Amino acid sequence: MEYVFLVVVAFFIVALGVRVGLDYSKNTQYTKQVLKELREIKELLQKGSEK
């Protein structure tokens, strides 16, 4: 009985870890996209001010 309980607890811990890892990955991807767009905006503003 104790073995089954430990397996269930371990499963939930692993599932939580995978979920947190996926959320972190999505957040990192979103942050990279925002930074890329900000760089593009900065370049456009610099080109516009040079004229």
Image (tube, grey):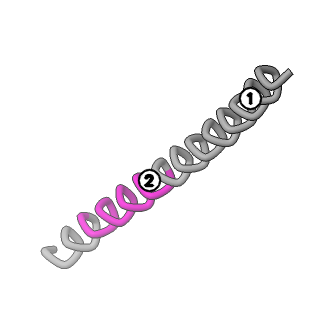
Q: Residues within 10 Å of mark 1 (few under 14, many from 20)?
A: few
Q: Do the residues bearing badges 1 and 2 touch, measured as CB atoms within 8 Å?
A: no
Which dot, 1 or 2, sits closer to the camera?
A: 1
Q: Is residue 3 left or right of residue 24?
A: left
In front of the other: 7 or 25 = 25
Determine the main secondary structure of the stretch shown in magenta. helix
Give the image location of residue 32, x and y in percent: 61, 46
Is residue 19 part of the magenta span, yes or no? Answer: yes
Q: Which residues are magenta?
A: 9-22
**Vertical arrangement, residue 31 with respect to residue 20, above or below:** above
Q: Amino acid at mark 2?
A: Arg
Secondary structure at badge 1 equals: helix
The residue singled out by tag 2 in the image is: 19
Q: Is residue 37 left or right of residue 11?
A: right
Give the image location of residue 51, x and y in percent: 86, 21
Q: Amino acid at mark 1?
A: Gln
Q: Which mark is residue 46?
A: 1
Instruction: Write the residue at 19% across / 78% down.
Output: 3
In front of the other: 39 or 32 = 39
Q: Is residue 12 left or right of residue 28?
A: left
